[in-house]
Amino acid sequence: MPHDLQPDVLRTELIELGDAFRSYQQRPEPDLALLAELHDRKARAFALWADVSGDGSLRHEAQRAEQAAQTTREMHQNRGGSPADGGPAVERLLTRTQAAHARTVLGYAADHAPLPQAEVRLAVLLLALRAARDGTGNVTGQDLTGWLQGDAEPVLQQLVDAGWLRLPGTVAEALASRPEDATAFTVPGLLPDQPRPFAFGKTTRSRISGWAQKALGDRKIRKKKLGIPTRLLALYTAAHTRPDGHLGPAEDDGLDLARTAAFCSLPPGQVPEHAALLITASWLSETGTTANRLHGRLAERVRPLGALL
């Protein structure tokens, strides 16, 4: 920084910023809200410095600081589930980036399930997550019966018959497989020689898979013996929430009813009754519909499963 930099207020701000960043580095615990504010101050100061000096590299540094402020705020929201200006903290299972990837997988399941039944949709979703990286994965009979109960055998056979799934043996053998001899399966449409629908790594795949199974296998939903369409609705609502738990983007206030119904393999007119079932299982704390939107809010107990929009 030039010793004779003008105006003096800019020079003073840059000196104070340097001191503030050094002080922040000495903190025993991070404060991402504070760090975002420091990056904002840096962006403003460097933009003014660029205006004064005409130095393009300073303009670039100002833009980098703006991006750093945005990234830091996203990190704060991912960790706490609330804006940087306060609100109750929620420890989220997925970061915002992972949440966006999760919605991509849900979209893939909706578009590529070879049959429209809810049971097929659920199997496609969970098997695709196992095979997301290279088209292959492992599954046990316990996995399959846990996901599909008594429907596991016919659903698996339908997927094989449709060519969506390849097994090394019979469906019965897959259902009998145990963790020590899990069945290695292939999803041809996800093999590396096909267009890649997913762009995430091993850690994100594992996180999304765990998130989906936690939502679909929720203890209270199981206790209520709610069916697969209702479980899919639980997953879909969790995948489309705001930090306060409300469904859908703020500008739309709710989820598109037709799209939600299609994912759950339900007629749109039946979505309200299944949403009401989720209230009995303390998955949603409120719900309602208008002509074309599903409104609602995740219950406090499942807020960590909310995949933030």
Image (cartoon, rainbow, N blue to C red):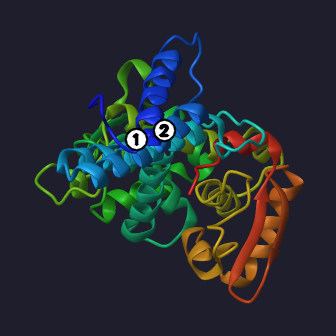
Left or right of 249, for residue 72:
left
Relative to 181, residue 240 above or below: below
Reading the image, the residue beneath label 2 is 72
Q: Is residue 95 visible?
A: no
Relative to 274, residue 66 above or below: above
CA distance for labels 2 and 1: 6 Å
Reading the image, the residue beneath label 1 is 68
Left or right of 115, for residue 266:
right
> What type is the residue that disc 1 sits on?
Ala
Instruction: Check contact, mark 2 vs mark 1: CB within 8 A.
Output: yes
Q: Is residue 262 visible?
A: yes
The location of residue 227, given as percent across then percent down, is: 71, 58
Left or right of 29, for residue 3:
left
Q: Residue furthest left?
A: 193
Relative to 78, residue 162 above or below: below
Decide which of 306, 11 is in the foreground and name it: 11
The location of residue 261, given as percent across then percent down, is: 62, 75
The location of residue 45, given as percent across then percent down, is: 41, 44
